Image (cartoon, rainbow, N blue to C red):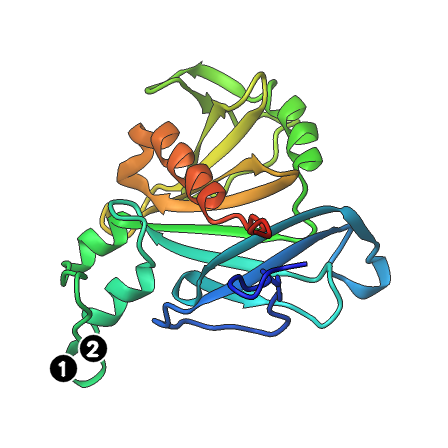
């Protein structure tokens, strides 16, 4: 029994679609593993689940009423770990923008550089990463900068867009991940995409191409942010 001076900690996951917001109210998010987001191929994996409690401003969410159909997106500032939506709101101009205490007005190029985008889908499982890692082992070319290898365009390696270049990096143990980056876009617009494991899921990560030399730091920051926002029940007193 919870005494009269303490409130029961009830986890209530949102089961609706959420778009961009600057609301700092804490909300609960649950992602349950599944084999597919396509209904006819969908099977729930109830033992694979991750829960978060974080401010609404971080969150973009697609969720059906039934678990296992979640697409959870997060926008976070690399420098402060604040919701990127707050920074976006203050630079929208005199008609749509607004001042937010503690949030500076950044130049668009700086905002894009600091903008970390993370995504967890119900059907994005770490086991897929491990299978892909075995393939990537044969796609490593010459050693590149910052502990990376050049991604070679071999027959057995998944193709890259003609407008992208690739790198292969090593994460925990022997797990490999690919990093694909825009090659022809101007530096202020070019982005990279990679993924890393978290609680049995494969997390998608999108970041500024200029941060590629700091890719390990970027991955560690992203994993640490997710860990800091995981839901942990408050023990009854």
Mark 1 and mark 2 residues within 8 Å of each other at the beta carbon: yes
- The image position of residue 196, as x and y in percent, is 53, 35
Q: Relative to 127, does residue 119 appear above or below in the rendering?
A: below
The answer to which of 170 and 151 lies nearer the viewer is 170
Q: Residue at x 52, y 52 (%)?
A: 119
* Picture disc at residue 61: none
Residue 185 visible at all: no
Q: Relative to 63, does residue 83 appear above or below in the rendering?
A: above
Q: Quadrant of residue 65?
A: bottom right
| Residue that mark 2 sits on | 97
Crowding around mark 1 (Cα neighbors within 10 Å: few <14, some 14 to 19, many 20+) is: few
Residue 234 visible at all: yes
Name of the residue lying farthest toward the top: 143
Q: Quadrant of residue 74?
A: bottom left
- The image position of residue 71, as x and y in percent, is 60, 60
- The image position of residue 185, as x and y in percent, is 30, 49
| Residue that mark 1 sits on | 94
Q: Residue at x 70, y 54 (%)?
A: 32
């Amino acid at each position: 029994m919870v005494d009269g001076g303490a409130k029961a900690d009830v986890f209530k996951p949102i089961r609706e679609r959420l778009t961009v917001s600057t609301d700092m109210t804490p909300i609960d998010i649950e992602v349950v593993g599944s084999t597919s987001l396509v209904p006819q191929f969908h099977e729930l994996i109830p033992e694979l689940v991750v829960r978060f409690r974080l401010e609404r401003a971080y969150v973009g969410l697609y969720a059906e009423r039934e678990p296992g159909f979640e697409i959870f997106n997060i926008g976070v500032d690399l420098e402060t770990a604040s919701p990127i939506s707050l920074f976006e709101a203050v630079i929208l101009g005199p008609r749509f923008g607004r001042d937010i205490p503690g949030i500076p007005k950044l130049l668009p190029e700086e905002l894009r550089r600091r903008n970390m985008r993370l995504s967890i889908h119900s059907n994005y499982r770490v086991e897929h990463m491990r299978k892909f890692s075995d393939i990537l082992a044969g796609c490593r070319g010459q050693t590149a900068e910052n502990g990376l290898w050049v991604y070679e365009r071999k027959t057995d390696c998944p193709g890259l867009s003609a407008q992208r270049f690739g790198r292969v990096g090593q994460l925990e143990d022997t797990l490999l991940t690919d990093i694909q980056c825009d090659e022809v876009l101007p530096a202020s617009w070019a982005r990279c995409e990679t993924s890393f494991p978290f609680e049995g899921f494969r997390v998608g990560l999108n970041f500024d191409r200029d941060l590629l030399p700091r890719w390990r730091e970027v991955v560690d920051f992203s994993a640490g942010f997710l860990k800091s926002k995981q839901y942990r029940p408050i023990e009854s007193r």
